[in-house]
Amino acid sequence: MATESELIEAVDSYLNRQEGRYAILIYGEWGCGKTRFIQNDLKQHLEDNDKPVLLLRASAFGANTSEELMGRIVSALINERAGIVNSTSSRNNTLKTLLKNTGLSSLNAAGAKVLKKLGISYSAPPQLVLSFLLPKKSLIVIDDLERCSIEENELFGTINDLTETHSLNVALVAKSVDNISAELVEKLVWRKYKFTPSPFELIRTIMGKEVAQIGSTSATELIAESLQLQTNLNARLLQRIKPLLVHTASSSFFSSGNTDDRIQWNVFSDIVSLSYEAAEQGTIAAAKPQYDDPLEHMRLERINERHEKYKSLRFIENYLNGGSQTTAEDLNAALSSYAIKYHPQTAREVAAITAVNRIKFWEFEDDEGQAGLEAIKEALSAGEIALVNIPRCIRAVKSLMQCGIATDKDLEDTLALSRELLLASTALSLKVFHSEGWHEWHTNDGPAELRLHEVDALRKEIEREHTSRASDTLMAGVNVGSENSGCAIANNARELMPLDAFAMTKVDPAVLAKIVSAGSVASIHCIRTAIFDLSKAADESSQLAERERWLADLSSELADVQVPSKTRSFHISCLKGDLRRYLSAEERHIVEDEPTATSD
């Protein structure tokens, strides 16, 4: 095995050898960076020597004959000498100049007439051209050798001609030794080197300085550490995920300096490993745990946790599937939400979530389980558990009950402390219930092995309390019989929208119909605007269904509303038309852009 520096030393030794003529073989897995190393690091090293060495690389991919392969090598030489000029005329002029400088052109000119009279055509074979044109110190690299279609004996003869007859230095590059003719390896290849690039060097070469820092740490070091479990890093996969890492590292979550370095490192490390794994496998799929084998169950639980993390960072999947780049605002929100759930900030929450994870995978002794239980209750009591992590804490306590470490009292305490945290802001709690990890709060809607009735009961209790609180907030300062009540409700709804976009559904449709019938034109318009904002809100299916029911109930309550004012009647008619369109859009999952100014 040879890293970049070791392989450079091996090539130097080969070029300075005193023994007979032979070729060397460089092999390594697809995508490990062999070609990149040859064209960049090795070429640069050979050119920077006191006595520069010319490196020519030609791909054997698809070559059918030795003549075709030799033609590619000569073409690589001409391109190298010509400064890689693509113009046909420039290439021809360069070749003429090279031939003239070597004397080959004079040979053709002097003998042309004689040969023509004798009926003999003359052309110099590629090997001869190389012998004349190549400097004494040079290295011919034949890449993708296993992907050529040249017959084995013919290929053997061509390489033998280069190394022995014309005394040229040749390096063969292939995926493995097994892909090359056994005779060729035995008789022409005296040295074989398996290329195993240094992860750090490979990452540094590919990433460059575009991802320079994550917090106070070099991104190259952090990426290398994140991928340390990968036995053979694939250069092509690194290139594929590079734009994603560059875009992610530029987000305000990493660049603003407002987030603790440790949290930034952990989040970025997860993004690196998850995006690399998804690029390699196509996705990160979930697996159904099998309870008849505890060890297998724990292994699958770890797979599912990777799946959950991957789904929490949806922008990775979107990028790998060719979707549009995530906006800066959405990216920062996703990173912040992910950090809250998987990389807590306070010491108490770190201790609690560490315990939760060990309990989840049953990696604890009795004393550790007891300490974990206390850490969970302490963090909850101090209010230092993110709401999104509450179901995981409850599940951990339930697991400890199975082995007799936790009691029914411990579970009651955990639920009571959780309820207190959730009640602090029911609007915020509702937002968490319908976030990316909604299934953890809606366990009856998920897989059987995740069902936890205590979590569902707690969620429903908070939802009922929120409905009551939101209804009170919406009706604050509202006099149902006043013509300005619609404006008051709309203003109250606007205050709640940042945390509960569906707040309007907490108003009783029958009460709202009375407010509409008594309202002024301005009041009716305010209600129309508030309902339009509601129609644009996007969330989980449970809330969308609730919105549809509310719109249908309000439409029904307004069906027989009649008022003496012609202008107010017109605006009520417009509101009824809005409701019909929104309900139709619910069925098509399409919402109209703006409320219209005319009635139906």
Image: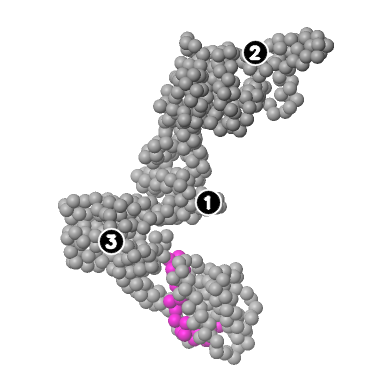
In depth, the one of 393 and 23 nearer the eye is 23
Q: Secondary structure at mark 2?
A: helix
Q: Quadrant of the C terminus?
A: bottom right
Quadrant containing the N terminus is top left
Q: Disc 2 marks which amino acid?
A: Phe
How dense is the environment of label 1, judged by Cα within 10 Å: few (below 14), some, or many (20 and up)? Answer: few
Would residue 462 appear left or right of 600 to someone viewing this image?
left
Residue 442 placed where, x, y %? 37, 67
Q: Residue at x 51, y 80 (%)?
A: 552
The disc placed on residue 395 is 3
Find the distance from the CA under tag 3 to the CA under tag 1. Answer: 34 Å
Query: Mark 3 touching mark 1, by CB under 8 A?
Result: no
- Please state which amino acid type lies under the numbered disc 3: Arg
Q: Give the residue type at disc 1.
A: Asn
* For marks 3 and 2 on the same chain, the one whose residue lies earlier in the sequence: 2
* Start-end of magenta stretch: 496-521
The structure's colour scheme is one colour
Q: Are marks 3 and 2 in contact (CB under 8 Å)?
A: no
* Residue in view at x 47 percent, y 9 percent: 18
Q: Which residue is mark 1?
A: 321
Q: Quadrant of residue 340?
A: bottom left
Choose the circle earlier in sequence order: 1 or 2. 2
Which of 409/564 is in front? 409
Residue mark closest to the camera, 1 vs 2:
2
**Mark 2 packing: few (<14 Cα in 10 Å), some, or many (20+)?**
some
Q: Which residue appears at 48% of the width and 25% of the height?
A: 182
**Rendered residue at 55%/69% (across/down):** 589
> What's the distance in space between the residues labelled 1 and 2, CA to CA?
51 Å
Q: Which residue is mark 2?
A: 132
